[in-house]
Image (cartoon, rainbow, N blue to C red):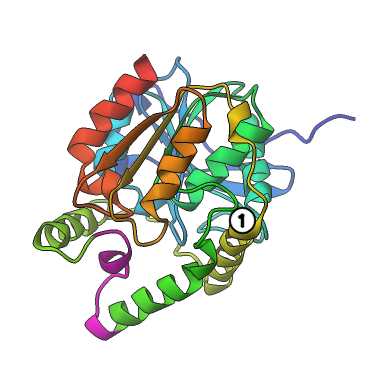
Amino acid sequence: MSQPRPTTDHQPSTDAARVAWQDAPTRTLEVSGVRFRYRELGPRGGVPVVFLHHLTAVLDDWDPRVVDGLAAHHHVITFDNRGVGGSSGSVPSTVQEMAADAAMFIRGLGHEKVDLLGFSLGGGVAQFVTLQNPDLVRKAIFTGTGPAGAGGLDKMVRIAGLAYLKAALTFSDPRNFLFFPRTPEGRRAAKAYLTRLKERTADRDERISLQAMGAQLRAIVDAGRQQPQDLGVIDKPVLVANGDADLMVASEHSADIARRIPGAQLVIYPGSGHGGIFQYHEQFVPTALAFLAS
């Protein structure tokens, strides 16, 4: 049976490698009836690094320092998965289905081998992409995430709900409470991170809908209640990173992933939480670059 041909409304320019994240054009790609919104930047020709983002996130929620840092040396691709931001359709009910959609998008762009960088929910999606499509993934970076079957993920609804309530009462962003510790250093890191997210002022993405956010939460809870996956079958180089005080996904779950994947590297950033890679972006980016180049 022939496969549906993907369609795109933009083609990469020869100047794409010189574009910064705040100016990267937003493109669309239609594959099997789903219209994915994405951006790409960095030098072409090598193995692309595909970013998979967190609960409630859209394209504009990636830290520019992380994207630009990796795009200085790699072809970087970020996208909204099905039902998120500007992408069409409805958010799937399981992380496994999200992973299938991610693989469909990647192959729709014409790539047969990629590196993955997944953060939080995106880290869970990246795990399943790697498990379901071992031929597609060269290397993977799992950050701020835990494995399927990890205890405590069923508490995510309460944790997120409390943070959103605090944010509403203080007229602030819930990531102040979810991603960073409430210490002087953590507060400064949160302010700097949220300021960086505003650097892009034009061609911004659509915000996630409440329906889509609810579906993502249900998928996370479902993943937490699943039987653990056999991560030992992953024979790819893997880097795992997190903060030492992750409120959303207990930091020991990241360590558990690293223990279960042969040869995986583990980096834990002190005095940081779920957003440890953003708080420590000046350390994380060189670590990620060295891992991808090794």
- Image quarter where the C terminus lies is top left
Instruction: Determine if the magenta segment contains residue 175.
Output: yes
Query: Which residue is identified by label 1?
Result: 223
Tell me, yes or no, if residue 104 can be seen here: yes
Which residue is at the front of the view, 153 or 286? 153
Instruction: State which quadrant residue 224 falls in.
Output: bottom right
Q: Quadrant of residue 229?
A: top right
The image position of residue 79, as x and y in percent, is 49, 44
Q: Is residue 263 above or below residue 209?
A: above
- Count of numbered marks: 1
Q: Which residues are magenta?
A: 169-180
Task: From the viewer's side, name the closer residue of 114 and 240.
Answer: 240
| Closest to the observer, 113 or 151 | 151
Q: Residue 44 in magenta?
A: no
Q: Residue furthest bottom?
A: 169
User: Which amino acid, by three-letter code, is at mark 1?
Assistant: Ala
**Residue 132, horizontal then vertical, whole percent:** 68, 34
Q: Position of residue 166 (x, y in %)?
A: 30, 80
Q: Is residue 187 left or right of residue 158?
A: left
Q: Give the farthest residue toward the left.
A: 184
- Dot 1: within a 10 Å radius of its alpha carbon, few (fewer than 14), some, or many (20 or more) residues? many
The x, y position of residue 273, in whole percent, is 28, 55
Q: Pick whichever, 274 or 266, lies toward us.
A: 266
Q: Quadrant of the N terminus?
A: top right
* 230 relative to 68 in the view: left or right: right
Q: Residue at x 23, y 52 (%)?
A: 272
Quadrant in which residue 21 is drawn: top left
SS at badge 1:
helix
Instruction: Residue 15: tell me if it is visible.
Output: no
Indicate left or right for 260 with 180 as reference.
right
Q: Is residue 160 above or below residue 129?
A: below
> For the point 28% across and 35% down, which residue is it?
68
